[in-house]
Amino acid sequence: MKNDKLVPGIILVTIGAIFLLHNFGYLHFHWRNLINLWPIFLVIGGVNLLLAHNRSSWATILKISVVVGGFALILFGNFDNSRWWPHATWHYNSDDDDNNDDDNADNGKNVRSTSSGTFTEPFDASVKVARLNVSGGATTYRLNDTTNDLFKADTKQFRGRYQLIGHKEDSVYVMDFSMKDNKGNWNWGNNNESNIADLSLNTKPEWEININAGATELNFDLSKYKIREVKLNGGAGSFTLKMGQPLQSTKIDVSSAATELTVEIPQDVACSIESSGLTSDNFDGFDKKSNGHYETQNFDAAKNKIYIHLNGIAADFKVHKY
């Protein structure tokens, strides 16, 4: 192959490999980087033209380095909050969003918002009870790890933007984590791609978790945490909750028209199920007390208990012991 065809060949192979890996879910990048960083292609083309007739090894290395560096910026760069390139974005806040953020700031709330990235809320040893409010659909929410911070979220987005608001209400520290729809947020991605939020919590406080999300896949492993209550309000989604050892009273309240709802509890935990819209009347390890009311055999004598209340319809509702 002639040297002057090397760089165009590398560019075509790289672009093809990027789109293949992206389509199969092995690679994610910010589509807006193609708009924000388009001058990189001018730099690549200019360097290739300037050194087109130079056959030396250093010229070849320079041309390849420019291509590799340029594509690395496009693939892995995130300039939404960059200080040195502050206007490189197709995202704008609507007037309503700006006003809401200003109001929250005036109320002493810590507001952070971005289309993609990492959110953290520092841990304060004085926080004994924390409440996490999660809202927004068209997102895959996963929680299966701990953090030294009070709260952490690693996010990827293809539509909308994430927002975290932290504030204190009496003795409870509250975090509102939401996916906000924004009419000013251009979407250059595949409409079939899903927003993803991987969440982590600190194990020291007692937790109250409120989830309000539709058209959502949610998988929360709460077995490592001290859970006071979980409130789930959603529809047309798949929800999985894995519970650990309960406090004296751990409550799970579900108001949902979910496609699939699964609750996993430890083998020896005392648990009660009450439902007004249950589609199943058989749970392994539970005794039926009345219509829509089930209890484990050790429920009355147990000191710590899990209470599950379903007020809605779940096409597939399961309670598993592990």
Image (tube, helix red, strand yellow):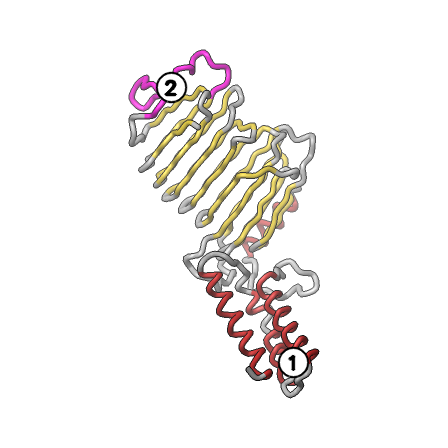
Q: Quadrant of the N terminus?
A: bottom right
In the image shown, does 230 or 78 lie closer to the viewer? 78
Region in magenta:
283-305
- What secondary structure is found at the residue carrying circle 2? strand
| Mark before the other along the chain sequence, 2 or 1 | 1
Label number found at residue 295: 2
Q: Residue at x 53, y 28 (%)?
A: 227
- What secondary structure is found at the residue carrying circle 1? helix
Image location (x, y in percent) of residue 111: 62, 47
Q: Quadrant of residue 55?
A: bottom right
Above or below: residue 117 compared with residue 152 = below
Image location (x, y in percent) of residue 283: 33, 25
Above or below: residue 210 compared with residue 288 = below
In the image shown, does 159 or 147 lie closer to the viewer? 147
User: Which residue reaches farthest front?
Assistant: 1
Q: In the drawing, does residue 310 fall left or right of residue 46? A: left
Q: In the drawing, does residue 164 fall left or right of residue 138? A: right
Q: Residue at x 62, y 41 (%)?
A: 166
In the image shown, does 193 or 44 lie closer to the viewer? 44
Residue of label 1: 47
Image location (x, y in percent) of residue 108: 66, 42
Identify the amino acid type marked 1. Val
